[in-house]
Image (cartoon, coloured by chain):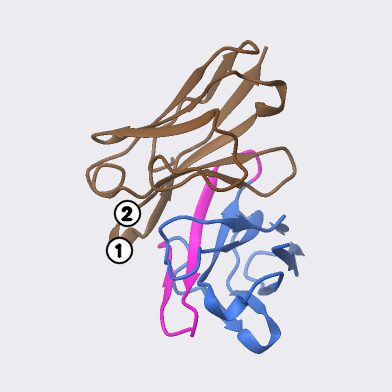
């Protein structure tokens, strides 16, 4: 069974940093590109970042470019999101999301349950 | 404001059919056959229901179908059931700059 389990969320102040993690199981992690998608409270979904299987390609939405950094460790079946210079508008549930094998950004076939990040003074 | 436009809510009675629209531009929905639809229940991560406009993943009921005409994609749910009540989001590939865009979501109520 495919599982994506996020962790690392919490309450932080504006300007702080936070690192999210996602541990994958039930599939060959190194064969799938991965993404982070977030959802502000009561709002819709927003794609924010992509990383290819070997970390050679990384993409970001304009809303997080220059502040967030995506990475992965295939030996640990783990995906990460380093979030710096956090803003109140970054408050959201952050989902770890899988691309289908051999595909990139065409669609997302599995999602985690999410981890909540709250940015407030 | 989301890049793709969906109705905020739709409703239907059990057994009826409903359609949710998703309107974009020629740079996303109209430019690629890469529209997908996701179902999200409260407190859960989204679930893939339709991909590549009209394809159903294994395990998704054939009551769910997708289509596209020009810059507008649609999700149709036939034979509505109480368990279909959820939020539905459309999504489209949007090229090598924007990458991916989502709709604002539609809340489906089964009366």
Is the C-beta separation of discs 2 and 1 under 8 Å? yes
Q: Position of residue B23 (x, y in %)?
A: 34, 33
CA gap between label 2 and label 1 equals: 8 Å
Q: Quadrant of the C terminus of chain B?
A: top right
Q: Is residue A50 left or right of residue B41?
A: left
Q: The disc numbered 2 marks a residue on which chain? A: B
Towards the viewer: B56 or A82: B56
Q: What x and y, as percent, mark residue A73?
A: 62, 85
Give me the chain that's blue: A
Label 2: which residue? Answer: B94
The chain that hosts pointer 1 is B
Residue B97 is marked as: 1
Chain B image colour: brown
In front: label 2 or label 1: 2
Left or right? Give the position of B41 relative to B10. Answer: right
Q: Residue B80 sits in which quadrant? A: top right
* Disc on res. A57: none
């Amino acid at each position: 069974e495919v599982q994506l389990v996020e962790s690392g969320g919490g309450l932080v102040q504006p300007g702080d940093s936070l690192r999210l993690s996602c541990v994958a199981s039930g599939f060959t992690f190194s064969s799938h590109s991965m993404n982070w998608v977030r959802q502000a409270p009561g709002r819709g979904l927003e794609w924010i970042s992509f990383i290819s299987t070997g970390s050679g390609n990384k993409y970001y939405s304009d809303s997080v470019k220059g502040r967030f950094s995506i990475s992965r460790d295939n030996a640990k079946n783990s995906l990460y999101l380093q979030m710096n210079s956090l803003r109140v508008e970054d408050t959201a549930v952050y989902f770890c999301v899988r691309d289908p094998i051999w595909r990139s950004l065409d669609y997302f076939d599995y999602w985690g349950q999410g981890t909540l990040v709250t940015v407030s003074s | 404001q989301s890049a793709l436009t969906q109705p905020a809510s739709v409703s239907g009675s059990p057994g009826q059919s409903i359609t949710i629209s998703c309107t974009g531009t020629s740079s996303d929905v109209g430019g690629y056959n890469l529209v997908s639809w996701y179902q999200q229940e409260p407190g859960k991560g989204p679930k893939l229901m339709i991909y590549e406009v009209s394809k159903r993943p294994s395990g998704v009921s054939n009551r769910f179908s997708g289509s596209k005409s020009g810059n507008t994609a649609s999700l149709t749910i036939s034979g509505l059931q109480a368990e279909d009540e959820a939020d539905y989001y459309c999504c489209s590939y949007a090229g090598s700059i924007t990458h991916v865009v989502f709709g604002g979501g539609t809340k489906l109520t089964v009366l």
